[in-house]
Amino acid sequence: MFPIADSKSPSAVKAAVASVHGEMFKQGEQSFVAKAFSWAVDSFEGRYRDYQPIDARYHDLEHTLQGTLCYAQILRGRQRAGATPAVPQRMFELGLLAILLHDTGYLKVRGDNEGTGAKYTLIHVNRSADFALQLLAEKNFSAEDTSIVRRMIRCTGVNVKIDAIPFQSEVERTVSFCIGTADLLGQMAAVDYVDKLPILFGEFAESARYNGTQNMFESAEHLRKLTPDFWQKYVLPKIEKDFQSNFQFLSEPYPDGPNPYLAAVEANIERSRRLAAEPVGIGAR
């Protein structure tokens, strides 16, 4: 079944990730997943401190849940395949926090009423890392663990220079690459990804207006037309080279079985090509 849980339902994704966690780590604290999800959901729904509910329409809670679901499956696939370095429970859980919090930089505080959180697109990664620092300090995480989560979040930046991130271990690097992979594949494999591209264009346009920069896309149609190139020239090389092909662990069975995430992305790319070839004015199907 793809996806293995409804990404519109936080409880369904939480249950799926808890099942993966329980399969991978039969000892230790089994309530961690529920706690991590509660912190993230409370944050996105406006129940943490003085933050408003998320109002960015593309980078919303569902977007985070899509990446989280993919992340858990990559880590499970790595363990089943016996890949090295092995990921211990603590690092899996820090990675879970990172993927759950990686877009909290789109959240606005109360009283910030100008536009939506999309205006923070250019700085959202740093804002997300700062949000994680605040939240995890309150939850009594160590400075070391908090720093790991913050470095992991940096891997989700579009223009991040991987070599500039001071990973402290090979397993930290590996989990960070799995997070970066999951962030990209989770959204691009969604059944409504192509339909949501106009919403993503709106976020880019708002960011450009707010920051006085030029939007690289002329219209939602232009964004959709360039999506195949985005996949072929940016995402695929990034997940293969920078992120060391961890997407391969999504194959069922590994290593030669079908990869449902790649298949779903390729279907979306083909659909975007087909729609881009239609005469202007023909609606999406």
Image: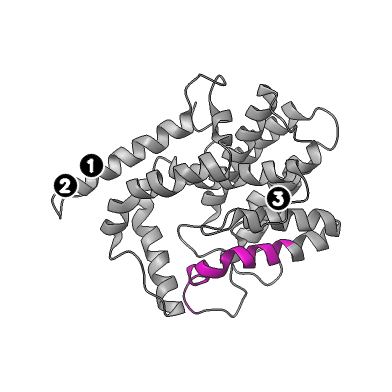
Q: Where residue 43 appears, x then y in whole percent?
A: 65, 60
Q: Going from the N terminus, do you reach mark 2 or mark 3 first?
A: 3
Q: Distance between the residues labelled 1 and 3?
A: 38 Å
Magenta region includes residue 194: no
Between 46 and 224, the one nearer to me in the picture: 224
| Position above or below: 174 against 80 | below
Residue with the mark numbered 2: 278
Q: Where residue 47 appears, x then y in whole percent?
A: 67, 63
| Position above or below: 251 against 197 | above
Q: Is residue 233 left or right of residue 63?
A: left
Q: In which quarter of the image is residue 5?
A: top right
State the residue at coordinates (34%, 48%): 229
Residue with the mark numbered 3: 97
Going by the numbered disc 1, the residue's amino acid type is Arg
State the residue at coordinates (57%, 50%): 64
- Provide the residue span drawn in magenta: 114-132
For label 1, count other residues whose C-alpha is less than 10 Å away and answer few (under 14), some (14-19) or many (20+). Answer: few
The quadrant of the rendering that contains the C terminus is top left
Magenta region includes residue 125: yes
Q: Where residue 206 appears, x then y in whole percent?
A: 41, 72
Q: In this view, does 123 lie to the left or right of 118?
A: right
Going by the numbered disc 3, the residue's amino acid type is Leu
Q: How far apart are marks 2 and 3 (CA)?
A: 42 Å
Residue 35 seen from this side: yes
- Specify how the rendered protein is coloured: one colour
Going by the numbered disc 2, the residue's amino acid type is Glu
Q: Going from the N terminus, do you reach mark 1 or mark 3 first?
A: 3
Instruction: Give the SS element for disc 2.
Output: loop
For label 3, count other residues whose C-alpha is less than 10 Å away and answer few (under 14), some (14-19) or many (20+). Answer: many
Residue with the mark numbered 1: 274
